[in-house]
Image: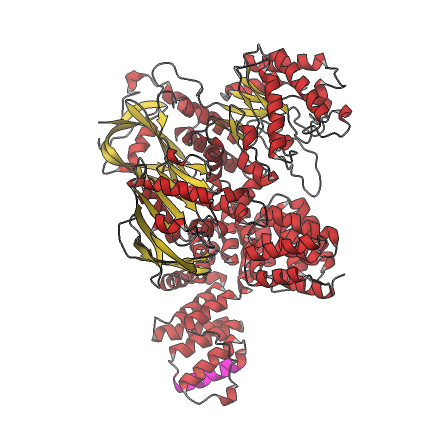
């Protein structure tokens, strides 16, 4: 374990609470006592990165690496600073290579390496890096999006669309939309045991929702079946059933449930969502998906995901102008929406606006890496077992 | 713009159309004589009617020259000894054809003084030939003595023995000798416009403001002994240079006749990263012009893209935006980054020159890119804006850059403040207020409105000066920046500071006093606010509150002036967040507040415009005015303009038949990054 000075410990606490100014001051205090405390430099780099002060982040991270060439959190901060600043792709490639060697299982290092290669116009190496990332984590959406963008650049939209669909399917925030529409929220309590659920409609429906939230799809489906046995026209149960079928790739059944729910009540947002997603999974029904998602975007205008789904269906129909508008609405609602950023980048590429497309992808990486909060994972691991 | 829609041939045929066939006065399309009800076609017809103007057409605007840096080497395969060993006649002819007026030439110390005190007369003669070629092509030259382009090794004198050319007394004495020799040799050459002591790359070696200032004084005095007239400059942008080197270049620049603005790649990444043709980045160049100006004319230096990442169309659109924003913001001229792209060797994994000298307006073979045509087209338009007859409206609103900006780390104010100031500048521009930049120790009496965007701390004497400024009728807008504010705030703003409410992720606005500060509207918007001042009653009018009733916006009459307090650093919050996806209600709030304060102070927008992303500049003339419009966005827009006076007609500044308007309002359609340059005649 690497010893830490009291000032550094204070800085860590302040940094974790988001007190940037005080944390920076504490880091400087730590460095005044011991300039070669690599953790203080690494933490300072992260603090500067969190304020988007890239030059300062590069300086601090470089110093940390000079002190200890195995300081993985400093590599992460350095690579991200280079990438977010842009332009210094040669440096960026070297840093991600180093980090991939120091932390070979770190998926983000491979994704970022691929993006640096791509920015430097080394497309084959970029694809190789993203494939490596997907080998490590098959649900790495950004690697998949990048591969789709690479396919778009090389072979056009028709080849790229399946990649965008697969990347979209990896996005967990789409499920968040369904649960928001269904009024299912995480209250911190675990889902009930299905055998202990009271035999009334409300309890079963609530328990099914909670189980679906925890991805216990079979138990949730069983409870829904009991609800539908009693009332086959229960629209909420039908909507949830459609979702459960979707999650099990039973698209036809999902479509049937959603259509049945909408026949009973056209104002069932969960069914509208499930129907749209089911249509979108069948490329030949993409036109129908566009109509459904258009309605969903109108019904839930303040949520970014319907606009993303609408944009993706428009992208599939090569209606790029409308798709761009929809993606931009989603980004306005949630600037950190990686999926909308990549979708918009795809549209911009088709219009020949390469610099803007590159910017959107960089922004996607920016928000994605901020969301991941990888620094603290690496920092803690390094501090506990570093050289 | 006709220059972008039609080919040159079509333009020519239109210009050559004989008047007997309708030519000048014949309307291209029938339409209503008044444009009041159909604003867009008004300008479309004005465009279509552009014709050859009567009388002599100026080739260039003498008050706003456009030029280009002419680096001595264009390929990496060349060595330092190949200094200007190429067909510069052809290049200068191309400059002349593009109507460039300036060319910056670089002296190679290494070439001119190969041994101590031994000057290469052939090299000097060769430089004379270069200057002669420039003169023959009606160019004027800025001669730069000490420049580092990382390739031509211009300042790497082999006998220097690794001594620092910036501080070593012996090398400085050799520099003085070189400068005097060159100035003495060419002082009679009318082709020399001015002397440039150093470029930014060379000056980046200075470790202190004193060293930089002393070096500049020494070199300047050595020139003045021989040439007492020609302007002397150091090509350093004070703001970008301070960011890069933490050295204040202002004392050095203050000794010169021109200041320089330069949006470097690293400064752009720091202050306004993102696409170069839309968003905050498109305002950065003019922000730096105002920041550099103070009392000196400002030459926009090194204008151009940094890398080959952009398409030719994007390069051209970027250049158009910068050139027009320079003209619209009172710059004194423009120097493009370089003429030809540097022909670099294939190198892996990637090569990008940190001194930004890779990308030019012509490709490696000298074929002009669209950006070159764009610059040439700009020169033709700018030539019609006679800056001796038309005066740009003086900016009486200033964004105040706090002195804390110059404090070193760990104080983060130096990192936050320039971004917040840029955002405030953008908001003022979006409100179409003529705005400039001031520093804390500047004379505030020159302004009517001062905006202090989210400063952490101002000096005690600054508070006293601000109080005096407001007492005497000035208007002050301040957004709370965190910490304990100065006690003077209570008196000026009429509020009690009850503490910092901490960070928030949502801004709520509820209107308490409608129409007091513009047409504000209530909203709830997601935005990360680092702090929020809890304000108590102290006599000010609460104009808007948050959802809990805590004042968000207050207005206080103090003496003869007004003071507006915003309880949160909105400018900093927008700048630190995603400036391309800032919540519209928040940006609108800032626009409305700035606009309303400036309007009340009598220095609001000269022309009402419904499109925030369209920048406008009004040049007042005696009989007519010239209006320049610039679209900062990537989409088509129509700028709906409302004037105080009745506009009788409009015409393109390049000539053409005036189109009757007969109204105070009309609309001007603008392409993405498009511009319109209109001559307005009033009733």
Quarter of the image with the N terminus of chain B is top left
Foreground residue among B328 and A349? B328
B564 with respect to B368 (left or right): left
Magenta stretch, residue numbers: A219-231
The chief SS type of the magenta part is helix
Q: Is residue A296 visible?
A: yes
Q: Is residue A277 above or below residue B260?
A: below
Q: Is residue A114 left or right of residue B511?
A: right
The residue positioned farthest toward the top in the image shown:
B188
Please provide percent x and percent y for residue B214.
Answer: 62, 27
In this rendered view, identify the residue nearer to me: A167 or B676.
B676
Which quadrant would residue B668 be assigned to in this image? top left
In which quadrant of the rendered image does the C terminus of chain B lie?
Answer: top left
Expressed as whole percent of the image width and height from the top left, the position of residue A257 reads: 43, 75
User: Is A221 within the magenta?
Assistant: yes
* Image height of A108 relative to B239, above or below: below
State the residue in front, A367 or B55.
A367
A8 horizontally vs B654: left or right: right
State whether residue B279 is above or below residue B649: below
State whether residue A352 appears in this view: no
Q: At 48% from the left edge and 22% from the top edge, which residue is drawn?
A: B65
Quarter where residue A205 is shown: bottom left
Residue ID at (28%, 16%): B20
Residue A208 in the image: x percent, y percent?
47, 80
- Decide: is A24 above or below B69: below
Please check the rendered image and state whether residue A104 is part of the magenta-colored stretch, yes or no: no
> Residue placed at 63% from the left, 64% from the top?
A138
Residue A191 in the image: state x and y as whole percent. Answer: 51, 81
């Amino acid at each position: 374990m690497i010893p830490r000075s009291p000032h550094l410990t204070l800085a860590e606490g302040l940094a974790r609470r988001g007190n940037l100014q005080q944390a920076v001051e504490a880091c400087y205090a730590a460095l005044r006592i011991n300039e070669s405390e690599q953790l203080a430099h690494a933490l300072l780099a992260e603090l500067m990165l969190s304020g988007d002060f890239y030059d300062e982040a590069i300086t601090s991270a470089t110093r940390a690496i000079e002190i200890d060439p195995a300081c993985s959190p400093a590599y992460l901060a350095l690579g991200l600073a280079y990438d977010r600043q842009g332009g210094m792709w040669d440096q960026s490639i070297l840093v991600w290579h180093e980090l991939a060697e120091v932390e070979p299982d770190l998926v983000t290092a491979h994704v970022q390496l691929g993006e640096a290669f791509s920015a430097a116009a080394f497309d084959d190496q970029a694809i190789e890096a993203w494939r490596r990332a997907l080998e490590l984590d098959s649900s790495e959406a950004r690697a998949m999006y990048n591969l789709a963008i690479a396919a778009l650049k090389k072979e056009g939209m028709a080849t790229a669309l399946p990649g965008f669909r697969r990347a979209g399917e990896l996005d967990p925030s789409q499920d968040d939309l369904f649960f928001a529409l269904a009024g299912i929220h995480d209250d911190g309590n675990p889902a009930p045991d299905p055998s202990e659920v009271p035999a009334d409609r409300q309890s079963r429906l609530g328990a099914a929702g909670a189980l679906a939230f925890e991805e216990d799809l079979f138990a949730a489906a069983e409870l829904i079946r009991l609800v539908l046995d009693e009332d086959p026209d229960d629209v909420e149960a039908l909507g949830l059933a459609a979702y459960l079928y979707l999650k099990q790739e039973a698209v036809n059944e999902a479509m049937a449930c959603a259509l049945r729910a909408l026949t009973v009540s056209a104002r069932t947002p969960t069914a509208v969502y499930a129907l749209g997603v089911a249509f979108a999974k069948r490329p030949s029904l993409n036109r129908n998906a566009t109509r459904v998602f258009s309605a969903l975007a109108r019904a839930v205008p303040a949520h970014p995901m319907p606009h993303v789904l609408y944009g993706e269906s428009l992208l599939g129909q090569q209606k790029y102008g409308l798709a761009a508008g929809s993606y931009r609405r989603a980004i306005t609602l949630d600037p950190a929406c990686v999926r909308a950023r990549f979708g918009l980048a795809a549209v911009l590429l088709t219009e020949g606006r390469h610099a803007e497309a590159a910017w959107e992808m960089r922004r996607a990486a920016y928000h994605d890496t901020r969301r991941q909060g990888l620094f603290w994972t690496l920092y803690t691991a390094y501090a506990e077992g570093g050289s | 713009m006709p220059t972008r829609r039609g080919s040159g041939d079509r333009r020519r045929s239109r210009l050559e159309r004989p008047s007997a066939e309708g030519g000048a006065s014949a309307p291209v399309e029938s339409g209503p004589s008044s444009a009041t009800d159909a604003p867009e076609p008004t300008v479309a017809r004005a465009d279509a009617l552009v014709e050859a103007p009567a009388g002599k057409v100026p080739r260039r605007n003498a008050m706003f020259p456009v030029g280009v840096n002419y680096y001595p080497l264009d390929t990496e395969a060349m060595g330092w000894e190949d200094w200007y060993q190429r067909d510069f006649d052809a290049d200068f002819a191309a400059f002349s054809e593009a109507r460039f007026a300036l060319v910056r030439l670089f002296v190679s110390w290494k070439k001119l003084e190969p041994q101590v005190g031994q000057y290469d007369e052939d090299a000097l003669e060769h430089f004379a030939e270069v200057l002669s070629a420039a003169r023959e092509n009606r160019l004027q030259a800025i001669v730069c003595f000490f420049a580092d382009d990382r390739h031509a090794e211009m300042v790497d004198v082999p006998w220097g023995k690794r001594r620092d050319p910036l501080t070593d007394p012996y090398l400085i004495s050799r520099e003085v000798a070189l400068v005097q020799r060159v100035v003495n040799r060419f002082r009679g050459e009318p082709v020399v416009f001015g002397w440039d002591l150093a470029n930014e790359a060379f000056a980046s070696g200075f470790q202190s403001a004193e060293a930089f200032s002393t070096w500049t004084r020494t070199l300047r005095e050595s020139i003045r002994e021989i040439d007492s007239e020609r302007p002397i400059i150091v090509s350093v942008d004070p703001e970008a240079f301070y960011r890069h080197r933490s050295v204040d270049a202002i004392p050095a620049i203050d000794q010169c006749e021109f200041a320089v603005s330069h949006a470097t790649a690293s400064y752009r990444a720091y202050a306004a990263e993102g696409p170069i043709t839309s968003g905050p980045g498109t305002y950065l160049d003019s922000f730096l012009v105002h920041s550099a100006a103070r009392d000196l004319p400002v030459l926009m230096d090194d204008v151009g893209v940094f890398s080959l990442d952009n398409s030719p169309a994007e390069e051209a659109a970027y250049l158009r935006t910068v050139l027009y924003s320079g003209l619209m913001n009172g710059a004194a001229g423009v120097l493009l980054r370089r003429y030809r792209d540097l022909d670099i060797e294939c190198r892996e994994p990637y090569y990008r020159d940190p001194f930004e000298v890779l990308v030019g307006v012509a490709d490696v073979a000298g074929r002009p890119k669209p950006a070159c045509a764009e610059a040439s087209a700009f020169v033709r338009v700018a030539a019609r804006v006679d800056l001796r007859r038309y005066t740009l409206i003086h900016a009486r609103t200033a964004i105040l850059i706090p002195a804390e900006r110059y404090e070193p780390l760990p104080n983060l104010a130096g990192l936050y403040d320039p971004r917040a100031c840029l955002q405030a500048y953008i908001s003022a521009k979006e409100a179409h207020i003529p705005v400039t930049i001031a520093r804390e120790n500047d004379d505030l009496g020159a302004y009517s409105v001062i905006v202090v965007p989210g400063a952490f701390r101002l000096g005690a004497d600054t508070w006293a000066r601000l109080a005096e400024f407001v007492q005497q009728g000035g208007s002050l807008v301040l957004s709370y920046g965190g910490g304990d504010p100065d006690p003077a705030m209570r008196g000026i703003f009429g509020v009690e500071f009850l503490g910092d409410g901490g960070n928030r992720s949502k801004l709520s606005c509820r209107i308490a006093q409608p129409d007091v500060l513009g047409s504000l509207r209530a909203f709830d918007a997601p935005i990360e606010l680092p702090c929020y001042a809890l304000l108590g009653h102290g006599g000010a009018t609460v104009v808007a509150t948050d959802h809990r009733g805590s004042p968000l916006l207050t207005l206080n009459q103090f003496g003869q002036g007004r003071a507006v307090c915003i309880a949160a650093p909105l400018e900093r919050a927008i700048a630190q967040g995603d400036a391309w996806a800032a919540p519209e209600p928040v940006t609108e709030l800032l626009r409305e507040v700035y606009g309303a304060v400036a309007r009340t102070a009598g220095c609001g927008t000269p022309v009402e415009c419904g499109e925030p992303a369209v920048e406008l500049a009004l040049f007042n003339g005696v009989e007519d005015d010239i209006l320049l419009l610039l679209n900062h966005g990537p989409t088509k827009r129509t700028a709906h303009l409302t004037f105080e006076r009745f506009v009788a007609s409009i015409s393109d500044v390049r000539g053409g038949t005036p189109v009757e308007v007969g109204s105070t309002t009309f609309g001007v359609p603008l392409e993405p990054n498009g511009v319109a340059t209109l001559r307005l005649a009033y009733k």
